[in-house]
Structure formats: structure tokens, C-alpha cells
Image (cartoon, rainbow, N blue to C red):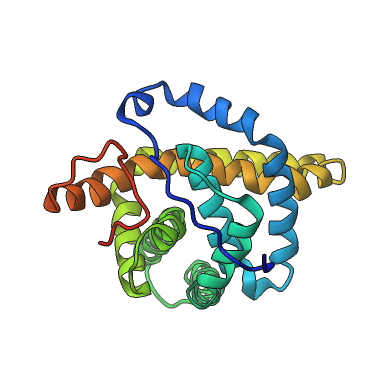
Amino acid sequence: MGFFKITTKEGPGVSKDEARSPTLIRFFKVLGTHFWQMVVLNALYVFACLPIVTIGPATAGLTYVLRNFSQGKPVEPFNDFFGKCKEHFKQGVIVTIFNIVFIAAALFAAYAWSSDEMQVSSLFRTVALVVVFFVMIIWVFANYYIYPLMVSFDLPLRKIVRNSVILGGYTLGRNILMTIVSAGIFVLCFFLFPFSVMIILFFAFSFCTLVNQFCTFPVLVKYVAKPIEKKNGGEDDAIFNDDRIL
């Protein structure tokens, strides 16, 4: 078996009865069942992200595996991690580069509009800063959906980004929850540094990604998978399959 080979298995997904179980119970069940696999995956993810430009492909791989964990779908964690990194390498690199450029531009814009050298009224400056902040927040929220869409649907990148921005601005409650969890974990790691190094290397990214899959999956089911299933007349017990195409 090649190191980057993807092993695909057909599985039933999550049945409707199981999907009705309380989310917290399912979350901690998955966390307990796959804890050690998540530890190894986190280390692989950190290693794969060391060339910063490969953060996107690595995130696609981690997202795919943890999406399947969250839904009880068969997956070979390490083969599929590297397989999805390779499959979505181009899209992932483009997203990474765009994110770097976006962050730099947003920080520059925030600095410029907050500077006294801008010869505009304080009201106009405040409005401009609010707009910059709003755009930054929406793009952060959109990033929660980019990779789940990327690994779950056969879409060109422009449609992935468009749909992610729409979902990022529409499902605010879930987006805020994901932001609080992720920010909380990494703020805690920051204040506990260097004692938190082991958490960062072996747990933080996998844990946050798993939380994100539990939050984003119902959104993809409601606004993407179910409309397609209804259109195709599907009545399968599995509420999500890899062959759904937007």
C-alpha cells in the first residue's frame, strides 16, 4: 500500500436514529473512541503544516478524517489523511495563500484607517474600521466551511468560497461557538506556554477540528446534502454521502 494511497470504503454513514442522539453525547463518544488516533493525527498535521504554504492541504486531510469520525463513517485515518492532502493540494495551497494575503491586507487596512495620518473625519474612520472588522469576521467564519465543502463535494474553488461566505454569514450561532472554542483553546495554550507545547503538538488542532465538524455537518446536511437528496429522489438511511455534488 502506497504512503499516499487513499483507501475508500463504502459505509452507511449516520442513521437517522443515531443522528437524533444528543450532540454532546455523540461528541464525547467519538472523542473517547478515537482519542489516540486524534493525538497522532494532530502531530502529523503540525508536521505537515511546517512549510506554511501546505497548511491548506493538511487541513483538508484532517477535516476529512475527523468529519468521518464525527459521523461514524469508515475511514483509514493515516492513509486518508495523506490521500486527501494530495487530492486537495492545489485548492488547499490557493486557500492558504489567499488567507495570508487577506490577513496582511486586513491588518494594513485596520492600521491605515486607525492612523491619524488619514485626513478624514472620525466618523468616516470609525465606519471604515467597522467594515474592515466585519469583513474579517465573515472570512474567519467562512473558513470553517471551506474545508468541509472541499472534501465533501465536487466543486470548483470559486463555488466553495462563495458557499462558505454565505454559510459563514448565515449560521452565526454555530460560527460564534466554534470561534469561542478555538480561541479559548489557543488563548489557554498561550498563557500556559511553554507547558502547553504538548497540547499544541498532540491535541489542540484535532480537538478544534472535531468540534468544527460537529457544528458544520448539520449545516451542510440542511443546506447542501438534503436539497440534493430531495432533488435526486433519494430516500437512503444515510443522511450524507461522499458522492453528493452541489
**Viewer-proximal residue among 31 and 181:** 31
Is residue 140 visible from the viewing direction of this image? yes
**Viewer-proximal residue among 80 and 151:** 80
**Viewer-proximal residue among 206 and 2:** 2
What residue lies at 30% left-to-right and 69% top-to-bottom? Answer: 159
The residue most toward the front is 1
The residue most toward the right is 194
> Left of 212 or right of it: where is 227?
left
The count of marks equals: 0
**Viewer-proximal residue among 240 and 167:** 240
Q: Is residue 35 above or below residue 135?
A: above
What residue lies at 73% left-to-right and 43% top-to-bottom? Answer: 39
Q: Is residue 118 above or below residue 29?
A: below
> Left of 58 or right of it: where is 42?
right
Is residue 99 visible from the viewing direction of this image? no
What residue lies at 35% left-to-right and 53% top-to-bottom? Answer: 168
What residue lies at 42% left-to-right and 64% top-to-bottom? Answer: 132
Residue 4: which quarter of the image? bottom right
- Image quadrant holding the C terminus, namely bottom left
- Image quadrant holding the N terminus, namely bottom right
Residue 144 point in image, percent of width and height: 45, 53
Residue 179 point in image, percent of width and height: 51, 44
Residue 244: which quarter of the image? bottom left
Residue 177 point in image, percent of width and height: 46, 37
Residue 56: which quarter of the image? bottom right
